[in-house]
Each structure stands twice: as C-alpha cells, then as structure tokens.
Image (spheres, helix red, strand yellow):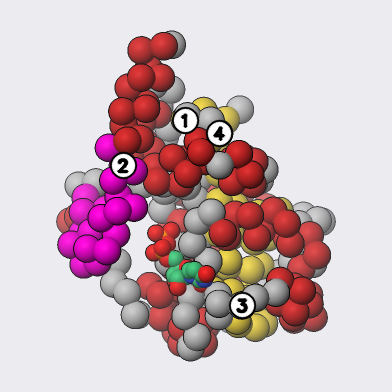
Amino acid sequence: MRIDVLGVGFDNLTLSEAVEKGCELLRREGTRYVVTPNPEIVEVCRENPAAREAVNGAALVLPDGIGVIRGAAMLGTPLKERVPGIEFAAGLLEKMAGEGMSLYLLGARPGVAETAAERLKERYPGLRVAGVHDGYFQEDGPIVADIRQSGADAVFVCLGAPKQELWMAKNGPATGARLLCGLGGSLDVFAGTVKRAPIFWCDHGLEWFYRLCSDPRRLGRMMKLPLFLIHVKREGRRK
Ligand code: UDP
C-alpha cells in the first residue's frame, strides 16, 4: 500500500525498514530500482507522464525531503519519516560491504565517480567497486554493456531527475544488476566535491535552504517547492 502525494505513490517505511527492503531486493532474482523523489520531482511528475510512470514503476519509492513528509501530512495520510537518498545509500553500502557485494557508480562530472569509489572503499571495507562511468554520455548501449560485463550487484545512477529515473526504467533489466538506485547528486557528496548540510539544518528540515545558500543557481528549481505546497493544499481541499 503506497501513500499518494500528487500522483506519486510513496512507500511508508522508516530509513532502516527501507534499507532492509533494499537488501532483500539485492538478494532476489531479477532487476529492480529505487527512487527517492523530493517535492521538486513530484512537481516534474505532475507535468511529465513518462517521468511519473518511471517513478511509480520503482520497487521502492522513498520520500527524500521534508516537503514530501509535510505534504503527506497535509493530505491526511502521513508518512513515517523522511528517507534521504544518501542515507539510504549509506545503509545499503554497509550491508553490501559486509557481504562483499559489488557496486557500479554511474553519473556526475568526469573524475567524480572515481574519487567517490576510492572514498567509499575506504569507508566501507569489503565493498567491491565493479566499475564507474561519468554521467555525460551520448549512448546508453556501451554503458549498459559495461555494467553487465562488470557483474555489479547494484548500480548507483546519479544523473539528476528525471533523467536517472527514465534511464533506470528503460535500461535496468539489461544491466543484469539486481538493484539500481537513483541518487541525484550523491556521488558529488561521496567524492567530497559537495558537502551535505550540517546536522542542525537537516534536523530542522532546512537542508533545502542550506543547499540553496551554497548554490544559489538552485533557486529556479526550488521555486517548485512553494508550487508543490499550493498543489497539496488544493488537493487537500478536494478530499
Ligand atoms: N548529471 C549527470 N549527467 C547529466 C546531468 C547531471 O551526471 O546529464 C549529474 C550532475 O553532475 C550531478 C547530478 O547529476 O552530479 C545531479 O545533481 P543534483 O544536485 O541536480 O541532484 P539532486 O540531488 O538535487 O537530485
């Protein structure tokens, strides 16, 4: 049972439940993918049916961002808690390292995935990195073939939204990996090129504001946030 927020169905799980579920998918036959939409992506999905289909087609849809939690509560169908993509990824990496599983990193500017790989191997001893590729490529075919050949158990797909969601929906099964996770700017954080907001900001639901201050170019994108709240209010009245 998913909780609907403006057409996107969210799984109602805590962070640790989500990680457990992710591990379960890693052990199961077949290929599945995880998405972590924030309000901005929900707004994109309202306007773009293909993006909405890709997002709702995921095996796990996790609420990244305090806005989604607030929106769900305003609609009278609260979600348990925020599940930031990067924290979900950290939980998964810990389990994968413990079992010697392998990971492929796809996305970000050239060089970033390599640095992220080095840092992740240091932080999670036992983790195997099967391969990396930057996110600025023209054709999917060679990338899919490289992932398949690497034999990776999981792939972190960090191409920004909705590109990564569409990419996973289209190419996921052909990669042969068990689990693909769409994680936006996470490789930049793992590589240390972008810093996550200090804990105070995250705890007070202000991570978005910290990110805006550190990168004012995000302002245009963030204008989707008030729009999201207006749409939630309107939807709430209709219920
Ligand atoms: N990116 C990419 N290929 C593209 C466009 C973007 O690899 O064609 C990368 C970009 O370098 C960045 C990430 O995708 O590392 C998107 O980061 P953003 O902060 O926009 O994502 P968010 O975490 O906000 O979803």
Sooner in the amino-acid sequence: mark 2 or mark 3 = 3
Secondary structure under the numbered disc 2 in the rendered image:
helix
Question: Which residue type carries mark 4?
Answer: Gly
The residue that disc 1 covers is: 5
Q: Quadrant of residue 150?
A: bottom right
Q: Nearer the viewer, residue 211 or 177?
A: 211
The residue that disc 3 covers is: 137
The x and y percentages for residue 45 are: 52, 41
- Measure the alpha-carbon separation of dots 3 and 4: 30 Å
Sooner in the amino-acid sequence: mark 3 or mark 4 = 4
Q: Which of the two discs, 3 and 4, sits closer to the camera?
A: 3
- Measure the alpha-carbon separation of dots 1 and 4: 6 Å
The residue that disc 2 covers is: 225
The residue that disc 4 covers is: 9
Sooner in the amino-acid sequence: mark 3 or mark 1 = 1
Question: Which residue type carries mark 2?
Answer: Leu
Judge left or right: residue 97 versus residue 185: right
Q: In this rendering, is residue 97 above or below 218?
A: below
Sooner in the amino-acid sequence: mark 2 or mark 1 = 1
